[in-house]
Amino acid sequence: MWGWFKAISPEQAGEIEQLGYGTIWLGGSPTTLDPARRLLEATTTIRVATGITNIWNTEPQAVAAEFADLERDFPGRFFLGVGVGHREATQEYASPYESMVSYLDGLDAHGVPADRRVLAALGPKMLRLAADRSLGAHPYLTTPAHTRIARETMGPDAFLAPEHKIVLDTDPVAAREIGRPPVATPYLKLTNYINNLKRLGYTDVDIADDGSDDLIDALVAHGDGPAIRAAVDEHLAAGADHVCLQVLGTADIVGVLRQLPPV
């Protein structure tokens, strides 16, 4: 499952582990790996990954040192997700592909194994880089159609873990009222996500006015537990190894997860 790094408590992590989930992804670009450590300390088997560590606000040498500490204390349980963020949010943003290559070179130089890191990748160049220089990709704000493209682009062996938002509500109008705001702001105003959605066939009309119903329904699964599980299964059928569920509309993440079919 996926959640903002400030929003998931150690107690929730323990409950998520008991439900059988394999990985907790920490979003929100933490500048240190301390949030991951807190969850690892509270659990025994579940993996923790950053989704993502932003290359513009972290130095590879410092991240590598923290990675080594986590690997010493929690062998095999932490994965480093890295990404280039957004040009609208980062003053230093430039040459995202080349900057990622340079960052990966830094991680290599300081001992972070390629098979313990994943890239936030949407477009074909970054997806191929993810397959070549890391365990695989963690695409955000995508659909099963993108998952299929990502799998074809990266090949059969790379790890693929798309994020998908969910609202546990059988009323589609109410569910869209919950799901639309966190999609519209900021994501439908960020160039890299807009470009990716257009590659998937969505138009300016779909993206305008905080997103058409069709677009929101594609990005935010809603309904009862079996309906949400069906949306997850679409990603798996398209080639995902793992789907990162982001619960919207409530702080009771565990309560929603308990109502979904077993993982």
Image: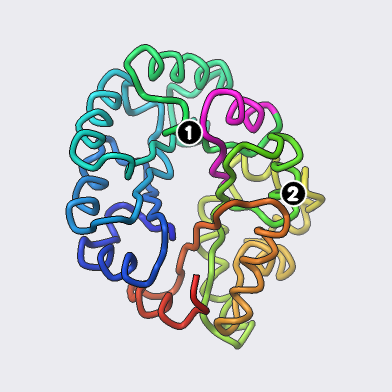
Label at residue 143? none
- How crowded pointer 1 is (Cα within 10 Å; few <14, some 14-19, many 20+) is rated as many
Q: Residue at x 31, y 70 (%)?
A: 18
When the figure is inspected, residue 62 is found, relative to residue 199, above or below; the finding is above
Label at residue 83? 1
Which quarter of the picture shows residue 24? Answer: bottom left
Q: At numbered mark 1, what does the secondary structure look like: helix, strand or loop?
A: strand
* Relative image position of residue 162 (x, y in whole percent): 58, 51
Left or right relative to 174: residue 24 = left
- Residue wearing tag 2: 148
* Relative image position of residue 77 (x, y in whole percent): 32, 45
Q: Amino acid at mark 1?
A: Gly
For the residues labelled 2 and 1, say whether their Cβ atoms are less than 8 Å apart.
no
Which quarter of the picture shows residue 234? Answer: bottom right
Main secondary-structure element of the magenta-colored stretch: helix
Q: Tag 1 or tag 2, which sits nearer the N-term?
A: 1
* Relative image position of residue 128 (x, y in whole percent): 66, 28
Q: Residue at x 39, y 58 (%)?
A: 3
Instruction: Please name which of the two marks, 2 or 1, marks the residue nearer to the observer.
Output: 2
Give the colour scheme of this rendering.
rainbow
The front one of 235 and 97 is 235
